[in-house]
Structure formats: structure tokens, C-alpha cells
Amino acid sequence: MKKVKVVRTFGNEKQTLGVLTTDNFACKTLELPDKKNASRVSCIPVGKYICKYTKSPLFSKNAGKDVFTYAILSVPNRAGIRIHSANYARQLLGCIALGSEHKDLDMDMQLDVIHSGKTMKQFEDFMNREDFELEIVKGY
């Protein structure tokens, strides 16, 4: 099983930024701030998780068609946590967004991620939509 690592490099009361790496793939990450794993307002705890490429009930409902993303399994006291595209922390409910770079898109003095949809597709293609072990560490 492939291993993927997210190193969180910065965090404040509004967001958590990091870098995702595996073999020959790297990108930037965006998460909610660390609020002690509180549901829908916090990033998930550091640790190791299994990720599976599955149909997302929420995204599928909103899109009116089947949408698949990576589900992050066995997050303590949480469910429905995924890796998906988003540009802003306010678009997340505890999930991890991927992008090519951190950049302040909306001039709110917070870094966002750019090219998220494209980066997600590249990651899913690189991973061949196979299960993987995700390790999240705090690097700051």
C-alpha cells in the first residue's frame, strides 16, 4: 500500500496549511484550524489513516451524479472526512483540500490553494485511485 504524508507547516485560528508528498508527487494542502477535532470546524488530529476512493454521498447529491473522492477512514469521533478540491478554508468541513500553490485569492490575508480541481485529478491519477496510508504530522 502506498504511503502519503501531509506535513502541516502553518496554522492559525482560521486555517492550517501544509504539503502533501508521496513518491514523485507533491502539492499544497489547506485545512481548517486545529480546534481539538471539533466536528465540522476543525482539521483532523495528527496520525495515520487509511484512505479509500469511494463515492461521496454529499458531493454526489450536490452534483446530481456520482462523484468519487478519497475518504479518510477511522478519524476519531468524525465521519465523512475526505480529500477533495476547494480553494478556501471556508469551503471545508474538516476535509483536506489539495492545490498547486498557496496564494491569497480573495485578499483576506489568508493563504488559499490554487488549481485545486486540476491538482486533485493529478493526485487521483497518480495514485491510480488505489487505497493508501495517510500520515499527518505537525511540522511547526
Image (cartoon, grey):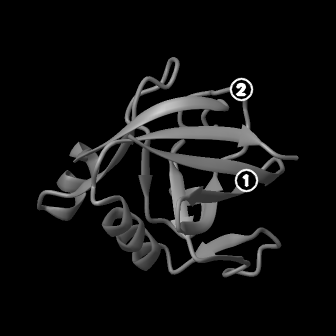
Please identify the quadrant where the N terminus is shown.
top left
In the image, residue 121 above or below residue 19: below
Give whichever of 128, 63 is nearer the camera: 128
Residue contact at pointers 2 and 1, CB within 8 angstroms: no
Amino acid beneath label 1: Gln
Q: Secondary structure at mark 1?
A: loop
Residue 89 point in image, percent of width and height:
62, 58
Taking the spot 53% from the left edge, 37% from the top edge, the residue there is 40
Report whether 86 appears left or right of 31. left
Give coordinates of residue 63: x percent, y percent. 20, 63
Residue at the image position 54 percent from the left and 42 percent from the top: 94
Tell me: 66 left or right of 35. left
Q: Residue 105 occupies which quadrant of the picture?
A: bottom right
Q: CA distance from mark 2 to mark 1?
A: 13 Å
At label 1, counting other C-alpha atoms closer than 10 Å, the crowd grade (few under 14, some 14-19, many 20 or more) is many
- Tell me if residue 85 can be seen: yes
Using the rendered view, name the quadrant where residue 37 is placed. top right
**Residue situated furthest right in the rendering:** 140
Residue that appears at 11% across and 61% down: 65
Label 2: few (<14), some or many (≥20) within 10 Å? few
Residue 5: mark in rendering: none
> From the viewer's perspective, is residue 61 above or below residue 35?
below
Looking at the picture, tell me which residue is in the foreground, 58 or 23: 23
The residue singled out by tag 2 in the image is 36
Pick whichever, 51 or 88, lies toward us: 51
For residue 15, the mark is 1
Please give left or right for residue 131 compared with residue 111 in the image.
Answer: left
